[in-house]
Image (tube, rainbow, N blue to C red):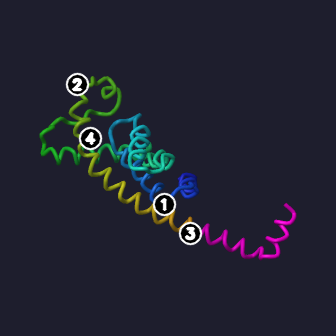
Amino acid sequence: MLYYAKRILRLSATPYAIASGCAIGAFASFTPLIGFHIVIAVALAWIIRGNLIAAIFGTAVGNPLTFPLIWASTYELGHVILRGEQAVAPPPLGRHFLEGSIENLSPIIKTMSIGSLPLGFLASLIVYAVVYKSVTAYQANRRHRLQGRRAAKGPAARKSARSQA
């Protein structure tokens, strides 16, 4: 995860573009459309002019460790929002789940889709705030370091570098 954080901080774009890309990626991870998270994130990031690479990195919010929690919470919230309208019990995980037909899974996917909207929005707000502040601080620190290096060289060093070129 530290690798992803460093890669995101080093992207060359505005803090808004990077943060919005990551936020959209996090939002897409909450949808039950497994296998399409990156496609959804890139399409939405392109629409809002977010960074496309950051959107791909943002989909890392959904991973094998977080998916069980995401799926359970989106199903439960969707069930609450629908007020029990979709009173279908979630199927047991394992072999029987994989043998289910699309007709059997349709009410579950609908419930999870509805529950994923508010949870994905909340996750995207949190990710946006954290990434925006981090990127802003990183870019300001980098600018300050570069200005310090230029000042350390001094005018004489710059003048001799120009005359050698």
Residue at numbered disc 3:
140
Q: Which mark is residue 113?
A: 4
Observer-side mark, 3 or 2, equals 3
Q: CA distance from mark 3 to mark 2?
A: 53 Å
Q: Secondary structure at mark 2?
A: helix
The quadrant where residue 67 appears: top left
| Precedes in sequence: disc 3 or disc 2 | 2
> How far across and down, in percent of the image, does residue 24 sit?
39, 49
Q: Are the residues flagged by discs 1 and 3 in contact, CB closer than 8 Å?
A: no
> Who's the residue at 41% across and 58% down the image?
128
Determine the image quadrant of residue 78.
top left
Chain part drawn in magenta: 140-165
Residue situated furthest right in the rendering? 164
112 or 100, which lies in front? 112
Whole-number angstrom distance, CA of label 1 to CA of label 3: 11 Å
Above or below, 147 relative to 32: below
Q: CA distance from mark 1 to mark 2?
A: 43 Å
Q: Measuring 54% from the left and 52% from the top, which residue is drawn there?
A: 4
SS at mark 3 in the image: helix
- Three-letter code for the amino acid on which mark 2 is drawn: Glu
Describe residue 139's horizontal placement relative to residue 49 as left or right.
Answer: right
Crowding at dot 1, Cα within 10 Å, few <14 / some 14-19 / many 20+, comes out as many
Tell which of 48 and 123 is nearer to you.
48
Residue that badge 2 annotates: 103
Q: Which residue is mark 1?
A: 15
